[in-house]
Image: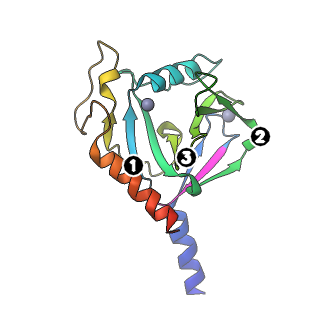
Amino acid sequence: MGNPGFSAISEAADKRSARCSCGSVEIEVFGTPITCVVCYCDSCQKGSGQIEALAKADPILDPDGGTAYILYRKDRIKYSKGAELLKSYKIEEKSPTSRVVATCCNTAMVMRFDDARHWVPVYRARLQNDIPPLQWRICTKFKPENARIPTGIPSSAMYPPGFAWKLLMSKLSMLLRR
Ligand SMILES: [Zn+2]
Ligand SMILES: [Zn+2]
């Protein structure tokens, strides 16, 4: 009896849920995220703005123009509920990047890449439990002119070396199936 019970608890502790604002769509993410960042790049600003403009959509952009994400390996994500309600938006037709929205309530859920990128950014505001702390503010050179970037975590004009390193390490551990 002891062992199975213990493993159920540790699995639960290792799992987080991302939910749309009405609760019809749910995504489960497993394990430690790669990292948590706020991105100020032009396409995140444009993409978040595009989704915010949909009917009844919750705000996505922070007041300073940033969008907060938690990055997971794409093998650590499960579309557990309401996957048929998801719809992809692109800011340009040929872009490999889609922003995936729960159409029930126009909530931005995740970003998806058509290219070889091995990670999925989950919109941090969708996480329901045990939300990991932010690590970096990235691409701040694209921030809106008058925006003041909060201090407290490191900011980088583009991508900090530690960020690239974490992505690389997560690719390796994925290849090694760890
Ligand atoms: Zn919904
Ligand atoms: Zn971005």
Q: Looking at the picture, how far across and down is residue 88, in whole percent?
A: 67, 31
**Mark closer to the chain start, 3 or 1:** 1
Q: Amino acid at mark 1?
A: Thr
Seen from the viewer's position, the closer of residues 13 and 45 is: 45
- Between the residue at mark 3 and the residue at mark 1, the CA separation in whole angstroms equals 18 Å
x and y, in percent, of residue 4 in the image: 60, 81
| Residue that label 2 marks | 84
Q: Identify the residue shown where x is 29% and y is 48%.
A: 162
| Amino acid type, callout 2 | Glu
**Is label 3 or label 2 in front?**
3
**Which residue position holds label 3?**
116
Find disc 1 in the rendering and name its residue.
35
Q: Is residue 43 above or below residue 116?
A: above
Label placed on residue 163: none
Q: Is residue 55 left or right of residue 120?
A: right
Q: In the rendered structure, which segment of residues is drawn in magenta?
A: 26-32
